Image (spheres, helix red, strand yellow):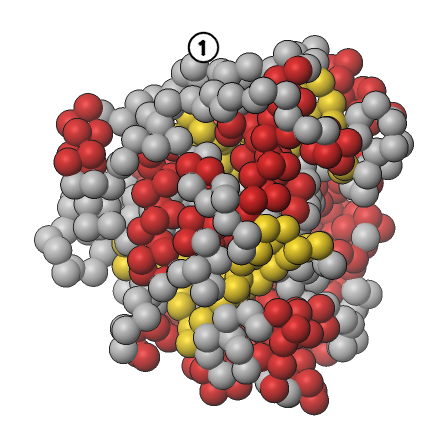
């Protein structure tokens, strides 16, 4: 039994094998190749796990899962954090040919239920330390709702579901039975920026190549000591080159629960970490910690810092070599499946100003002109989107707030990457409008003057909601400053995507890697935001349309397309 999926076209598969990209090895070879090594593979707190012990633990768990009736071609739903058991579980499932979805630890009810609806898992493996599984209420409801689940294992459980007990039980004549290399190994999660992450089937062959090629570009070797402070289950931390890249090379993965400087700096010094990965907000926090007195002495062993998951501002990029004291490598496209890196020998200008180039010579990227026609190599253009088909032959500038221009992005990093509350709502309002002023001057007004259309993710109404309705700044003051900064450049159409606060927060935290300062302010604050945005829509029906954002992506997209077509075309 195998999992159905859209296969690679035969001509592509043949070419990838001829060029050595695909080697027809199941992913479990990453571990079995080093099964007899006594080098340390994982450091998790005080636990130092060698490759030999790692492999034995994997086989023990695989045998236990087989004994519970799991077999090749079935699926699993896994939700474990940055713990050694995550990797043991992943490889154990590979050993018996069961394809997992690795949910992020931040995912909640809506994500877990959505994944289960899609894959019909035979087993659920989760953690009692997660709020959903502290008791049995959600567990019982989940199993009742998803009748495909025949087995449950829980980390830190003391009873019949104990994951640790299954790992400790010696394997009984276990024989690995992975799926073939051209079949589905596991389901990767999309970025989740448009709702519940989508499930992307990854074959052993294509994922193994991505890991090996990433290692080549990033210089990962047996001497690599990699600090994994990002969500272990995320594709960035898994394979770019991530933990799987380090295991492939025979290096050591050190686990951290979060990327805070207070946790990571001592770990880097203690374990002589030489490679790690961050997202831009974490970079800001590290730089701030250094400036506030922590210094960079604890980071002397660090040679390479990868940054991806979101755009890194030029300002922050330029500070990394000087203040952290290591080389920067930018990464892009982990969720999209087309991974790009800056090379270690690239000129500083390329490293600071770009997110690199495709990692494989056979990666195909096409760029379109304003009419949607492919451009010759080297020409500057744009990628097509769903909305492009609605807007037709119009030039569209896509931007965002806070940010959207060089100066505005500097302010964005101050505002959204701070995990404390350093400013009053009034100060925050002034910062937002300072950012908006630069955004208008540098990006929006030049585009409008050229006759382009501008699509902005958030604009002045966010200040009316966040700092006004949420923070208590008088709406009369916001309108006064808005009149001076924005003036007549108000949106022709404002789309307000509305859904219950709890669902919105689950989606936001489900992305796992991005800024969460505002998302962390609690339900009461976000209920005020919802009321604030809906109030703006009621006051300005001439430009506002409320879009019901519940339901599947395609359904919401159709509501969006209809609104644009009705109001603007």
Q: Going by the image, does 425 lie left or right of 397?
A: right
Count the numbered circles shown: 1
228 over 541 or under it: above or below: below
Residue at 45% in and 54% down: 250
Instruction: Please indicate, yes or no, whether residue 136 appears anywhere in the rendered image.
Output: yes
Instruction: Please indicate, yes or no, whether residue 244 appears anywhere in the rendered image.
Output: no
Q: Quadrant of residue 472?
A: bottom right
**Quarter of the figure that contains the C terminus:** top left
- Residue farthest along the left direction in this orientation: 376
| Location of mark 1 (residue) | 1
Residue at 84% in and 33% down: 157
Dot 1: few (<14), some (14–19), or many (≥20) neighbours within 10 Å? few
Residue 247: percent from the left, percent from the top?
Answer: 48, 50
**Quarter of the figure that contains the N terminus:** top left
Q: Going by the image, does 339 lie left or right of 102?
A: left
Q: Nearer the viewer, residue 78 or 119?
A: 78
Task: For mark 1, give the secondary structure.
Answer: loop
318 over 67 or under it: above or below: below
Residue at 15% in and 60% down: 379
Q: Quadrant of residue 23?
A: top left
Residue 407: percent from the left, percent from the top?
Answer: 48, 78
Q: Nearer the viewer, residue 283 or 418?
A: 283
Q: Going by the image, does 131 lie left or right of 449?
A: right
Residue at 82% in and 48% down: 523
Residue 125: percent from the left, percent from the top?
Answer: 69, 30
Q: Quadrant of residue 415?
A: bottom right
177 over 484 or under it: above or below: above
Residue 537: percent from the left, percent from the top?
Answer: 65, 46
């Amino acid at each position: 039994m195998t999992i159905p999926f859209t296969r690679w076209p035969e001509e592509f598969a043949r070419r990838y094998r001829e060029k050595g990209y695909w080697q027809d090895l199941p992913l479990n070879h990453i571990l079995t190749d080093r099964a007899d090594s006594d080098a340390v593979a994982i450091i998790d707190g005080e636990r130092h796990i060698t490759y030999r012990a790692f492999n034995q633990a994997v086989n023990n768990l695989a045998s236990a899962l087989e004994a519970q009736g799991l077999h090749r071609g079935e699926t699993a739903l896994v939700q474990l954090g940055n713990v050694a058991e995550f990797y043991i579980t992943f490889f154990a499932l590979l050993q018996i040919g069961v394809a997992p979805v690795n949910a992020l630890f931040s995912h909640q009810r809506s994500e877990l239920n959505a994944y289960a609806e899609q894959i019909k898992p035979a087993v659920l493996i989760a953690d009692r330390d997660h709020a959903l599984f502290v008791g049995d209420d959600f567990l019982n409801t989940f199993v009742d709702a998803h009748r495909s689940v025949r087995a449950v294992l829980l980390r830190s459980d003391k009873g019949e579901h104990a994951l640790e007990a299954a790992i400790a039980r010696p394997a009984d004549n276990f024989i690995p039975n992975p799926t073939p290399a051209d079949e589905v190994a596991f389901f990767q999660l999309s970025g989740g920026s448009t709702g519940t992450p989508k499930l992307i089937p990854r074959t052993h062959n294509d994922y193994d190549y991505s890991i090996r090629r990433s290692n080549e570009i990033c210089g990962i070797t047996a001497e690599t000591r990699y600090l994994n402070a990002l969500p272990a289950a995320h594709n960035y931390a898994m394979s770019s080159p991530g933990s799987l890249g380090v295991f492939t090379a025979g290096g050591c993965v050190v686990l951290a629960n979060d990327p805070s400087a207070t946790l990571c700096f001592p770990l880097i010094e203690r374990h002589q970490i030489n490679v790690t990965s961050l997202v831009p907000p974490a970079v800001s926090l590290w730089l701030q910690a250094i400036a506030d007195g922590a210094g960079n002495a604890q980071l002397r062993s660090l040679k390479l810092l990868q940054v991806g998951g979101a755009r890194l501002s030029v300002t922050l990029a330029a500070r990394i070599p000087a203040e952290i004291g290591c080389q920067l490598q930018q990464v892009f496209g982990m969720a999209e499946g087309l991974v790009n890196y800056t090379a270690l020998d690239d000129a500083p200008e390329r490293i600071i100003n770009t997110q690199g180039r495709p990692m494989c010579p056979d990666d195909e990227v096409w760029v379109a002109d304003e009419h949607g026609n492919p451009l010759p190599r080297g020409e500057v253009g744009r990628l097509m989107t769903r909305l492009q088909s609605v807007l037709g032959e119009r030039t569209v500038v896509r931007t965002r707030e806070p940010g959207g221009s060089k100066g505005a992005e500097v302010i964005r990093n101050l505002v959204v990457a701070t995990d404390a509350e350093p400013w009053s709502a009034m100060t925050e309002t002034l910062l937002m409008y300072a950012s908006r002023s630069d955004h208008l001057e540098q990006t929006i007004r030049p585009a409008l003057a050229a006759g382009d259309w501008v699509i902005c993710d958030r604009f002045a109404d966010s200040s009316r909601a966040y700092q006004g309705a949420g923070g208590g700044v008088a709406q009369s003051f916001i309108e006064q400053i808005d009149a001076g900064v924005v003036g007549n450049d108000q949106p022709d159409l404002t789309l307000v995507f509305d859904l219950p606060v709890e669902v919105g927060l689950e989606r936001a935290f489900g992305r796992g890697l991005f800024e969460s300062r505002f998302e962390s302010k609690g339900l009461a604050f976000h209920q005020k935001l919802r009321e604030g945005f809906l109030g703006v829509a009621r006051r300005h029906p001439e430009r506002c349309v409320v879009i019901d954002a519940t339901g599947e992506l395609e359904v919401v997209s159709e509501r969006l397309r209809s609104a644009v077509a009705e109001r603007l075309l």
